[in-house]
Amino acid sequence: MPLSPLRLGVNVDHVATLRNARGETFPDPVRAALLAIEAGADGITAHLREDRRHIRDDDMVRLKQEISTPLNFEMAATEQMLDIALRIRPHAACLVPERRTERTTEGGLDVLGGHDHLRVFVSELARGGVRVSLFIEPSSEAVEAARSIGAPVVEFHTGAWCHAALAGETQRAAAEFARIGAAVLRASGLGLECHAGHGLDFETAEAIAALPQIAELNIGHFLVSEAVFIGLGPAIKKMRAAMNAGRARAK
Ligand SMILES: CC(=O)[C@@H](O)[C@H](O)COP(=O)(O)O
Ligand SMILES: NCC(=O)COP(=O)(O)O
């Protein structure tokens, strides 16, 4: 059976982090998105956080206007973000948890406790023609809750696995990767499209690409970090090659 293609979503949040560090207009995340697409990105992801620490409202408007690929709008499940998303009408929206004091997205959505609250957002966004994904922990409970909420897509938070791999904690990394594999199997068995992201680098992207049920990887911080040294285009091309190598091993 032919393998599903594996899409690369490039997250441009941290180009905006660098821009905001000095309150300038550069580097522009929209320019980064256009370069990323030229280098082979299948889509662009941007997280409009409530505190606007990196991506700002105008960035999201310009991304929608200027890019030729799908835009994946990451957002907290709040009324304000829902209004903005329905005004901008991205191709997709990914509901993510946000805690004001967090340095980065620390975990997946509380799809069990927040079930009824999230259900409203999923149906409102779907009614607006926006494909909705839920950013969840790699667990069967979260998958089943996401399915009952009605989202067609789940994105698995790969942070715990990536951090363990980076720290050389091989046993913990193997256990976390097994969690991801089991959750992906459960999700695809329920007919959900599977995405993954957070903390991925060349090695972990190649490893997770070998899971045939994964349709999309969203990668940002590492690519922007690599871009500092080798350029954004070469970093994306290298990531694409790593993903292709992993997908070639998928069975
Ligand atoms: C949801 C996710 O994992 C990424 O979009 C992440 O949120 C990047 O932005 P931060 O680094 O601000 O968390
Ligand atoms: N949803 C994950 C994402 O968009 C990028 O996360 P990261 O690669 O910046 O950690």
Image (cartoon, rainbow, N blue to C red):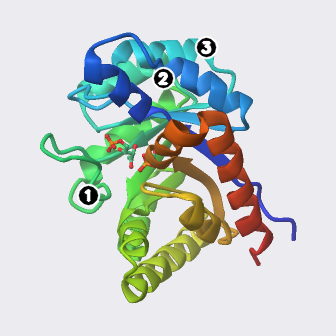
Tag 3: amino acid: Glu
Q: Residue 100 carries which label?
A: none
Q: Residue at x 43, y 56 (%)?
A: 199
Residue placed most toward the observer, 3 or 148:
3
> Which residue is rendered at x = 42% and y = 80% of the image?
173
Task: Give the tally of numbered discs.
Answer: 3
Question: Where does residue 84 sit, x and y in percent of width and height?
Answer: 36, 19
Q: Does the residue labelled 3 lie within 8 Å of ligand 2?
A: no
Per the image, label 1 sits on a secondary structure element best described as loop
Residue 81 sits in quarter: top left
Say what secondary structure mark 3 lies in.
Answer: helix
Name which residue type carries label 2.
Pro
Contact check, label 3 and label 1, Cβ < 8 Å: no
The picture places residue 183, in percent across and down from the top left corner, at: 49, 74
Q: Quadrant of residue 159?
A: bottom left
Q: Determine whether 249 is above or below 220 in the image.
A: below
Residue at image mark 3: 66
Quarter of image, res 19: top left
